[in-house]
Amino acid sequence: MTGGGLYKTVRRVLDLDGWYYMRTEYLECSSCTKKCASWSESIRKQLDLDHQLLFPAVLTYRLSCDRKVLAQMKGRTLGSSASRLRSFPVEQHTAEWMRRSIHYLNTCRKFLVAGVQMPPPQPPPQMVPVPSCGWLLSTYVLESFTRIEELKAKVTSTFGSILKMDSTKKVTKKLAGADAGTALWMSSVGNELGQVLMSVLTAAEGYGLRDMTRGLQERYQLAGKEPPQVLYVDRDCCRRDGGTCAAAALVPAWPHLLVRLDIWTWTYSRCDLGDK
């Protein structure tokens, strides 16, 4: 591909303390003469990772956002939300706008001449407002898709020696749009640190558990990790007729895994027996 002149659109990019503008050029195919902006994703994906990381912004339909702004969202804590993210650039943009306005007015004073009537200087331009929290959140989602392989690697590299399997309906009730009502249960396996190793959405409780546990066993095997020691469940932990319990039957690759009833269910069951 060869250069085909400047691209007509100039992108305005949100930075931590202001805005900057970014331009690019057309790239033209010598065979079909088709033109494409050089910052398009189809062009950038052909570069090596080193040059892809040099691109500073995430492009949206109208505005663009610098990656330094979105980096504030990566440390997800209780206080790290979209509204908190927006408050930081708003404060920085306001301080930078005031600094530039003072500098502009002070420069205008240098042109005053004693005894000469001059028109008052033009007021400084208004500060460009920072986009809404919804725009920042949607832009962060777009940026996350660019590192989806990295996120997959982080999720599938989570292990544990003490596992807990549980099912809930609370998450499925939050499904909206076309996915609403398509699932009734979410079954998950977590470790001793509270990290979720794997989850599955099902139409009924208990469905899909065998596929989930099979994938979990393969993950341990491919990573060369030692099998977990204990699995806590809220049911099906008792052996019948001296055989294997239903929960242990889901993980045949871990024959030495201890299956135990979790403390909350055990305490709740003891209270029920005491009441009876």
Image: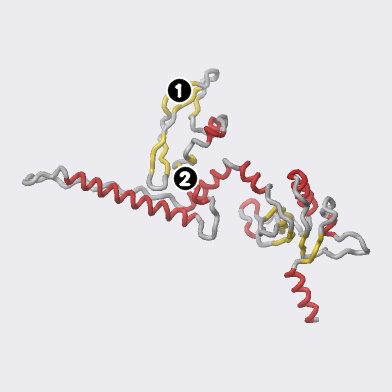
Q: Residue furthest right?
A: 241
Q: CA distance from mark 1 to mark 2?
A: 31 Å
Q: Is residue 245 left or right of residue 57?
A: right
Q: For numbered disc 1, what is the local secondary structure?
A: strand
123 or 215: nearer the viewer = 215
- Circle 2 sits in a helix, a strand or a loop, which is it? helix
Name the outermost residue toward the bottom: 275
Nearer to us in this view, 159 or 181: 159
Residue at 38%, 51% (x, y): give it: 92
- Quadrant for the C terminus in the image: bottom right
Quick check: 167 left or right of 276?
left
Residue 30 position (above or below residue 99): above
Mark 1 belongs to which amino acid? Gly
Outermost left residue: 115
**Above or below, comparing residue 268 to residue 45 in the picture:** below
Left-right relation of 131 to 119: right
Task: Tell me whether circle 1 and circle 2 mark residues in contact (CB < 8 Å).
Answer: no
Amino acid marked by disc 2? Lys
- Between 226 and 266, the residue placed more toward the observer is 226
- Say which residue appears at 36% left-offset and 47% top-offset: 128
Residue ID for mark 1: 4
Q: Quadrant of residue 202?
A: bottom right
Mark nearest the camera among 1 and 2 is 2
Mark 1 or mark 2: which comes first in sequence? Answer: 1
In the image, which disc is placed on residue 126? none
- On the rendered structure, is 183 left or right of 132? right
Q: Which residue is mark 2?
A: 68
- Where is residue 88 shown, x and y percent of the image? 42, 54
User: How many numbered tags mark residues here?
Assistant: 2
* Image coords of residue 268 (percent x, y): 75, 73
